[in-house]
Image (cartoon, rainbow, N blue to C red):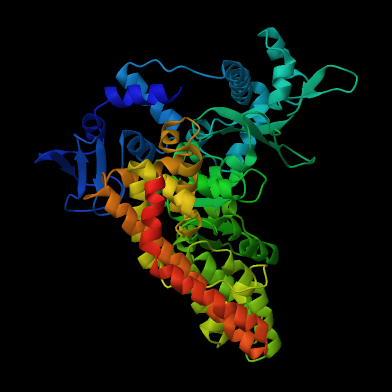
């Protein structure tokens, strides 16, 4: 598939009937109106514009085109949305990289064959022990079938013989991780005498397997190794089954697949699990496509508490604030789900935010009346808070830390700036986060409809001035790939979401050249103001250090910046004429 395919589908699909399959729309003037499917409301604020082929909710702010609607409502990727709409439009997609796709298809087919084999074995006489084990764990037959659980016989070559009988080369199974190559040549089955848990990706393809041993032996749990189709840091067990539920329920992240299965068996269907790795930014990015409510479950012992403090790191670059569910000591989710369903509900309902937990846990072992403990808390928490990319939330956390420590917020902010690594504090901007976003969104709107705006941002170096994470990523993508890159298959889904939401508002009203000049002046003013504040701060330090040469140099620099500010509009107009 390429840009031609995308444009062909856009020209063949009407957004109104597509959205009507999910929302009861009523015509009102030139638009259609209905209750927003993305948030709860009683008065319709969701509008579909058939002329512009866009949708916009004036309640929650979501908006975009037909692709972003399907991606959002169904939790699918852009290629999946493209494929679905191509079917509706009767468009046949060209598929580049056939050789690579053919190789991956072989791996998918091998895994499907293995899954059928393992499930058949569980239902056979050989699987009676495994079935008894699952029944002892109080799993219903419905749960066993829903999770497609299976059994790998206690044999070195049972699956291998099946592959040979079906004409599937053992090398393909080895590339999936189903077989291990012998030093003397040949292969043998990786999984033996184990309960099998198939692992599916977000598109429901079988990409790997997890396995629990029956009886004594190590390791207790074993996964297939990573392959061309299986990357552990990009997959969450059971997400393919529950992604449609998470918008309302939120996600519960546990450590193992048995925990997920037991929770589902007990009626708690929103659980997903990592696969032997710590939660990563890729995992958080994946979850953020479906929900903004995430509960992280940890053991109640010291190791679990320490893991909870580390778990905040992958969330620092996202607008998600996870909650912390701390289990009773010695219990895991599987135990609680089987023995005390009410307790599990209470643990979820009473879960504090992860940041609340981190603060409470850190302060619980320190005495803030002692200078050494204050210093220790500052050293422990400031680096973590500094990593938060959202400036407003970072400021809130800094304020909270200052209140808990009994120091001024300026002290905490200074420590955060000095922790940047360049030895200099960062100059604060005059603009607050709340003021910045509308300005940044206006500039982004201009960039999405006027190539001159992209060239101006690039030439004047404004890319670093975007503080909003999503807008910053989008502006850099536009500078590298242009607007045409938004229709490229390799365009990240998050970039596409943000762009389509802003484009749903249409072109900026009024004279686009005047708007470009005005926005260029505002961005340039912000840059100069930040420089002047930085110079002022350094002047104070130079005065305190009696560094006359440094002071004189800074005074000249400050005057130059003041003069530059007087001529901003003429400078921006000159640049605009050149591009």
Q: Quadrant of residue 364?
A: bottom right
In the rendered view, would you say 524 is above or below 481?
below
Q: Residue at x 54, y 51 (%)?
A: 253
* Left or right relative to 175: residue 90: left
The one nearer the camera, 84 or 332, is 84
The one nearer the camera, 147 or 546, is 546
The image shows residue 533 at horizontal and vertical percentages of 50, 76
Q: Residue at x 48, y 65 (%)?
A: 351
The one nearer the camera, 243 or 454, is 454
The image shows residue 193 at horizontal and vertical percentages of 73, 30
In the rendered view, would you say 101 is above or below 336?
above
Q: Quadrant of residue 299?
A: bottom right
* Left or right relative to 212: residue 288: left
Q: Is residue 290 visible?
A: no
Q: Is residue 190 visible?
A: yes
Q: Residue at x 34, y 42 (%)?
A: 450
On-image quarter of the C terminus: top left
In the rendered view, would you say 545 is above or below 319?
below
The image shows residue 499 at horizontal and vertical percentages of 38, 43
In the rendered view, would you say 380 is above or below 551?
above
Residue furthest to the left: 29
The image shows residue 568 at horizontal and vertical percentages of 39, 64
């Amino acid at each position: 598939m390429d840009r031609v395919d995308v444009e062909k589908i856009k020209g063949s699909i009407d957004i109104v009937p597509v959205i009507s399959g999910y929302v009861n729309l009523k015509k009102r003037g030139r638009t259609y109106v209905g209750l927003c499917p993305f948030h709860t409301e009683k008065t319709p604020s969701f509008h579909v514009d058939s002329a512009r082929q866009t949708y916009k909710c004036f309640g929650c702010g979501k908006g975009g085109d037909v692709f972003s609607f399907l991606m959002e409502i169904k939790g699918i990727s852009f290629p999946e949305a493209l494929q679905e709409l191509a079917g509706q439009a009767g468009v046949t997609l060209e598929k580049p990289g056939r050789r690579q796709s053919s190789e991956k298809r072989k791996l998918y087919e091998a895994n499907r064959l293995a899954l059928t084999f393992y499930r058949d074995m569980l239902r056979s006489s050989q699987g009676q022990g495994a079935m008894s084990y699952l029944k002892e764990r109080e799993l219903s037959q419905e749960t066993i079938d829903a999770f497609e659980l299976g059994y790998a016989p206690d044999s070195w070559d049972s699956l291998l013989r099946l592959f040979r009988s079906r004409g599937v080369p053992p090398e393909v199974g080895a590339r999936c991780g189903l077989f291990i190559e012998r030093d003397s040549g040949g292969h043998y089955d990786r999984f033996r005498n184990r309960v099998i848990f198939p692992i599916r990706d977000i598109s429901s393809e079988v990409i790997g397997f997890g396995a629990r041993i029956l009886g004594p032996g190590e390791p207790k749990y074993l996964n297939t190794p990573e392959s061309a189709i299986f990357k552990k840091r990009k997959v969450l067990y059971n997400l393919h089954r529950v992604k449609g539920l998470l918008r309302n329920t939120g996600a519960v992240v546990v450590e193992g697949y048995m925990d997920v299965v037991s929770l589902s068996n007990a009626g708690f269907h929103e659980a997903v699990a990592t696969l032997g790795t710590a939660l990563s930014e890729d995992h958080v990015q994946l979850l953020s496509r479906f929900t903004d409510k995430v509960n992280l479950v940890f053991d109640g012992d010291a190791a679990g508490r320490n893991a909870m403090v580390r778990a905040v790191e992958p969330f620092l670059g996202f607008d998600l604030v996870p909650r912390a569910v701390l289990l009773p000591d010695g219990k895991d989710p599987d135990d609680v789900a089987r023995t005390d369903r009410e307790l599990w509900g209470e643990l979820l309902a009473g879960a504090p935010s992860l940041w609340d937990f981190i603060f409470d846990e850190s302060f619980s072992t320190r005495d803030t009346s002692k200078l050494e403990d204050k210093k220790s808390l500052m050293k422990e928490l400031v680096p973590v808070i500094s990593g938060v990319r959202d400036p407003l939330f970072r400021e809130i956390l800094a304020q909270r830390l200052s209140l808990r420590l009994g120091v001024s917020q300026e002290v905490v902010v200074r420590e955060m700036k000095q922790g940047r690594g360049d030895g200099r504090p960062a100059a604060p901007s005059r603009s607050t986060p709340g003021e910045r976003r509308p300005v940044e969104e206006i500039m982004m709107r201009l960039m999405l409809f006027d190539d001159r705006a992209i060239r101006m941002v690039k030439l004047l170096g404004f890319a670093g001035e975007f503080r909003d994470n999503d807008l910053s990523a989008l502006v850099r993508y536009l500078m590298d790939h242009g607007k045409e890159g938004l229709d490229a298959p390799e365009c990240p889904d998050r970039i596409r979401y943000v762009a389509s939401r802003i484009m749903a508002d249409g072109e900026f009203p009024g004279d686009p050249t005047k708007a470009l000049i005005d926005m260029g002046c505002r961005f340039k003013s912000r840059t100069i103001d930040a420089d002047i504040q930085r110079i002022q701060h350094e002047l104070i330090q130079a005065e305190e250090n009696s560094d006359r040469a440094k002071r004189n140099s800074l005074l000249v620099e400050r005057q130059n910046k003041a003069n530059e500010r007087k001529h901003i509009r003429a400078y921006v107009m000159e640049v605009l004429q050149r591009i």
